[in-house]
Amino acid sequence: MEALITYAQAAALLGLKLPTLYTLVSRRTIPHVRLSGRIVRFDPVVLEHWRKSRAVPVDELAIRRAASTAGK
């Protein structure tokens, strides 16, 4: 088990600004561990899975359409 990381470390890992991370936690959008009322930590492995699950698949048809109209 990896050690839990702080807000600052999690923000750096995800490439987010701290206020954005605070908002995600308050909205319960991002996985976190609340150790007490104000102490929040993050599991870096879980954050990486969360980040990967948020990826948007590429729409191949839209790419082909855009390429065909770009040449006109």
Image: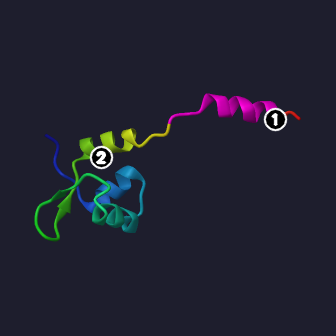
Return the residue nearer the eye: 23 or 1.
23
Q: How many marks?
A: 2
What secondary structure is found at the residue carrying circle 1? Answer: helix
Which residue is identified by label 2?
A: 47
Image position of 56 (left or right of 69): left
Which quadrant is home to the C terminus?
A: top right
The residue lying toward the viewer, choosing from 15 and 36, is 36
Give the residue furthest to the left: 36
- Which segment is the magenta one? 57-70
Was residue 65 drawn as part of the magenta stretch in this picture? yes
Magenta stretch encompasses residue 44: no
Horizontal and vertical percent position of residue 55: 45, 40
Of 31 and 4, which appears nearest the observer?
31
The label number, if any, that marks residue 69 in the structure image: 1
Amino acid type, callout 1:
Thr
Would you say 32 lies left or right of 15 here?
Answer: left
